[in-house]
Image (cartoon, helix red, strand yellow):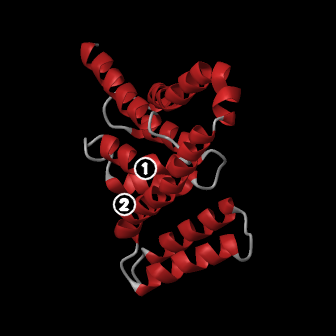
Amino acid sequence: MAATRSQALALFQAFYRSGALVFGGGHVVLPLLRAATVSTGWIDDNTFLAGYGAAQAVPGPLFTFSAYLGAVVKPEPHGAVGATIALLALFLPGLLLVISVLPFWNQLRSNAKTRALFAGVNSSVVGILLAALYQPVWTSSVHEPFDFAVVLAAFLALVAWKAPPWIVVCAVAAIGGIASFPP
């Protein structure tokens, strides 16, 4: 039981630390979540990327993804208990921040220096999001011209044709499944 408790604490700590760095968008913590789960051997890279792709089809993908990761980690606790720990740990830093800042929010919002600080932080998120897209998603998924064509088609479906994300995710998963079978 002691090993389970220490693993539960390690799981909580990994997701709490990742949740503490969510700003401007949840995808900025993708490299942290990958380091916390794949690098530790809790899950393999393919399972990580498959869950990340599937989570994009639903609202709140980061939180859905954290519950997925908590559910599929190899050491116990996993399943519903692991999902609950990961989800709560990821939410907790933001919740604590909101509770602590809420009494001062109007004052902070009206301060020009605070607004400038948040504008700078939000701008830096764009670079972090691009880095998270490149590593691990792009480097582990786009190896051939066919892969690039699928990514481009998915991008066009989302941006130009305004296709629902869940349809694009399902279509790309189907294409990937079909393409992985040898002729």
Residue 131 in picture, x, y percent from top left: 40, 61
Q: Which mark is residue 62?
A: none
Amino acid under disc 1? Leu
Residue occupying image coordinates x 30% and y 24%: 7
Element assignment for label 2: helix
**For residue 10, above or below residue 36:** above
What is the CA distance from the residue labelled 2 to the residue labelled 1?
8 Å
Could you tell me residue 6's position as x and y percent? Answer: 28, 19
Which structural element holds mark 1?
helix
Please state which of residues 11 and 18 is positioned toward the viewer in this rendering: 18
Res. 76 image quadrant: top left
Q: Nearer the viewer, residue 22 or 71?
A: 22
In this figure, what is the number of numbered marks?
A: 2
**Residue at the spot 37% in from the left edge and 57% down from the top edge:** 46
Badges 2 and 1: C-beta atoms under 8 Å apart?
A: yes
| Of 36 and 173, the residue lying toward us | 36
Q: Which residue is mark 1?
A: 30
Q: Which residue is mark 2?
A: 136
| Quadrant in the rendering for residue 57 | bottom right
Q: Which of disc 1 and disc 2 is earlier in sequence?
A: 1
Q: Position of residue 18 (x, y in %)?
A: 41, 37
